Amino acid sequence: GGNWKCNPATIKEANDLIKAWKKSVSSYDKEKVDVVICLPALWLFNLKEQLSELGFSTSAQNVSKTGSGAFTGEWTAESLVDLGLSWTLIGHSERRGEFGILPMESNETLATKLKYILDAGMTCVFCI
């Protein structure tokens, strides 16, 4: 799997990549390996089905530490689950302040997020 970050630049490029994978992905033991792709938020739901056909799971690249409310731009775990996602990534270096995102996500914030994610029944890719 992998974190696509903010790549590729267009949905067409993303679809082209998935088409290429469909031609080249060999079988693997899905009981032993989870392939999880962390997609840019704008493409999560457009690409989820295509990736599922390959046996891959899709993941959000972040989740809020709170439930619903006045938190512009945030995703709640409940919303992600409602849309059929069971994975999310948290703690990436960019979110920890590497690129000037303030306030930086502290270990305490990430612990709060992790509890929230697990309580919602999701699986977490926790970057350390």
Image (cartoon, rainbow, N blue to C red):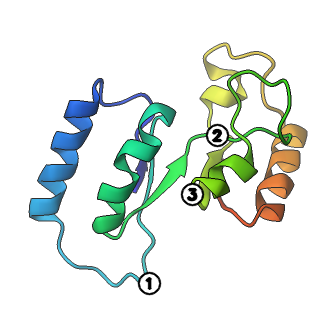
Left-right relation of 85 to 72: left
Residue at point 86%, 31% (across, down): 69
Q: Nearer the viewer, residue 42 or 34?
A: 42
Q: CA distance from mark 1 to mark 3?
A: 20 Å
For residue 90, the mark is: none
Query: Residue type at mark 2?
Result: Asn
Q: Secondary structure at mark 1?
A: loop
Is any atom of residue 1 visible in this view? yes
- Determine whether 14 is above or below 20 in the image: above
Query: Residue type at mark 3?
Result: Leu
Left-right relation of 43 to 19: right
Q: CA distance from mark 1 to mark 2?
A: 25 Å
Residue at point 84%, 34% (across, down): 106
The residue where tag 1 is placed is: 32
Q: Quadrant of the N terminus?
A: bottom left
Mark earlier in primary sequence (3, 2): 2
Residue at point 42%, 28% (across, down): 6
Mark earlier in primary sequence (1, 3): 1
Q: Position of residue 27 (x, y in %)?
A: 22, 79
The residue where tag 3 is placed is: 85
Q: Nearer the viewer, residue 13 or 2?
A: 13
Is any atom of residue 125 visible in this view? no
For residue 62, the mark is: 2
